[in-house]
């Protein structure tokens, strides 16, 4: 394979095109994945904000039944895996799963440790820091948002129940959303990109092979056959029409061969008393 | 007098034989060197595969990215690293193809392993190695395969040339007339 022009020419082309396409494919997919995941986190954050706003009035009125109804209705929405509200001590006050209510959550658990890693817990988090991903018991990928419920002037001054004004965070909302739709979209994008890359690779290699064969390899083979035929038959057949420089090579070969034949056919007329021809 | 002449002729013959032996030895050594040099690309590729295995296991012996970021500052964004990686891959391929075209003897394979290790580390510290691992692997594999191929074809051509010179030396007792080195690649 490597002792022929085709092998020597096509191997580097194949390596370069395939490799560069793979690199671009992986990098582009990683960039798209990052954008899609960032968007889904932003949307999940917005949803957490909506839930907090929806439950605010019920919390102000200390209406547990209304809170439970809101959480039950939101969790019935397609794609919402769980909704929980924790109080300051880390006890589940409201949950879409009634069996979780009044359970204590470990502060070192995933989702809590982000704020409770140090002795003094963090009270503000960026959009991306609020998010975490994990797999639930049934193996589904879940994106969860942990949003702090901040103390506001109305909460601290409310008549129904009292939170000291210096208490910054009253509790947290934990909402889990199924990543199935996002992962499905990513798989679709990946598949489309893969098909596009394979087609591009196939077309590039096929194009290079076709052009190389048409312009170089087939004419080279014809030239080789012509020279071999001339050598064997000792004749001076006209060369086939070949493209570009190869035609000039074939013509030159034809004229050299014709000259040689002419010289060979002429009877030898060396000068008399030529010392070179006086072999013993 | 005649004996002195004979001695002189004998000495000349010995000198010629010595010179021929030296030339022969030189050519054989050069062929040996070229054979060893032709494996250089494969050694670099093996080293890169070893490095990739370490990267695949998430550089278990290095400090965690958060610790390094805390002491050195934030790593470049993954998008920036990816752009540099594309630029590097493109340049390295063009450079390798140019060297292939010019028929240069350039032993550059191992420095590419160093550059690629840098990319692995930058992605690791930016906590984006998982998503971009195959990009660095693909880039490294492509560049090092191309470099291996370049070095191997260069060495094969040179070994062929030296073997012809050796055969000529054995037949005629002298080296063939010098050829223009670049004639094959003009």
Image (cartoon, coloured by chain):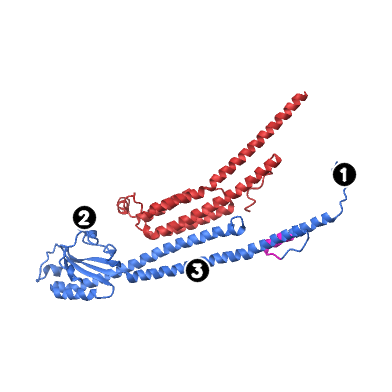
Chain colours: A blue, B red
* SS category of the residue bearing label 1: loop
> From the viewer's perspective, is the residue at label 1 or at label 2 nearer?
1
Question: Which of the chains bears the disc numbered 1?
Answer: A
Q: Which mark is residue A274?
A: 1
Which quarter of the image is occupied by the N terminus of chain B?
top right
Q: Magenta: predominant secondary structure element?
A: helix
Tell me: residue A84, above or below residue A115. below
Residue with the mark numbered 3? A199
Residue B77 in sight here: no
Q: Position of residue A177 (x, y in %)?
A: 28, 70
Q: Is residue A232 left or right of residue B179?
A: right
Q: Position of residue B53 (x, y in %)?
A: 40, 53
Q: Which residue is mark 2?
A: A118
| Circle nearer the N terminus (2, 3) | 2
**Magenta highlight on residue A203:** no
Subunit that carries the residue with mark 2: A
Q: Residue at the spot x=76%, y=26% of the render? A: B5
**Which corner quadrant of the image does residue A65 belong to?**
bottom left
């Amino acid at each position: 394979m490597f002792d022929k022009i085709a092998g020597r020419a096509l191997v580097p082309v194949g390596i370069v095109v395939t490799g560069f396409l793979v690199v671009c494919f992986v990098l582009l997919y990683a960039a798209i994945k990052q954008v899609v995941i960032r968007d889904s986190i932003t949307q999940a954050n917005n949803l957490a904000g909506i839930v907090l706003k929806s439950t605010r009035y019920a919390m102000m009125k200390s209406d547990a039944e209304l809170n439970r109804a809101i959480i039950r209705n939101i969790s019935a929405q397609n794609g919402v895996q769980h909704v929980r509200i924790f109080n300051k001590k880390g006890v589940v006050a409201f949950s879409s799963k009634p069996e979780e209510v009044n359970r204590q959550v470990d502060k070192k658990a995933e989702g809590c440790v982000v704020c409770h890693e140090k002795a003094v817990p963090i009270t503000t988090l960026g959009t991306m820091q609020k998010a975490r991903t994990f797999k639930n018991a049934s193996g589904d990928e879940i994106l969860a948002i942990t949003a702090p419920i901040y103390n506001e002037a109305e909460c601290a001054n409310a008549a129904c129940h009292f939170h000291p004004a210096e208490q910054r965070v009253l509790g947290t909302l934990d909402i889990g959303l199924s990543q199935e739709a996002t992962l499905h979209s990513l798989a679709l994008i990946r598949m489309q990109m893969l098909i596009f890359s394979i087609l591009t690779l196939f077309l590039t290699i096929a194009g290079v092979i076709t052009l190389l064969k048409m312009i170089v390899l087939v004419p080279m083979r014809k030239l080789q056959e012509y020279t071999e035929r001339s050598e064997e038959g000792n004749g001076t057949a006209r060369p086939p029409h070949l493209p570009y420089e190869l035609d000039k090579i074939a013509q030159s070969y034809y004229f050299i061969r014709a000259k040689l034949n002419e010289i060979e056919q002429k009877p030898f007329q060396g000068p008399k008393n030529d010392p070179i021809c006086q072999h013993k | 007098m005649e004996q002195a002449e004979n001695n002189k002729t004998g000495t000349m013959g010995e000198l010629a034989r010595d010179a021929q032996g030296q030339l022969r030895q030189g050519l054989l050594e050069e062929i040996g060197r070229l054979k060893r040099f032709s494996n250089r690309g494969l050694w670099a590729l093996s080293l890169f595969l070893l490095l990739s295995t370490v990267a695949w296991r998430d550089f278990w012996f290095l400090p965690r990215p958060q610790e390094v970021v805390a002491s050195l500052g934030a790593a470049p964004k993954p998008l920036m690293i990816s752009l540099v990686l594309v630029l590097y891959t493109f340049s390295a391929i063009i450079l390798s193809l140019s060297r292939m075209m010019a028929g240069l003897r350039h032993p550059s394979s191992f420095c590419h392993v160093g550059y690629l290790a840098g990319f692995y580390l930058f992605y690791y510290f930016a906590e984006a190695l998982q998503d971009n691992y195959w990009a660095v692997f693909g880039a490294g594999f492509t560049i090092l395969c191309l470099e291996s191929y370049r070095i191997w074809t260069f060495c094969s051509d040179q070994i062929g040339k030296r073997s012809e010179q050796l055969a000529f030396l054995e037949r005629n007792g002298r080296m063939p007339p010098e050829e223009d080195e670049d004639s094959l690649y003009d």
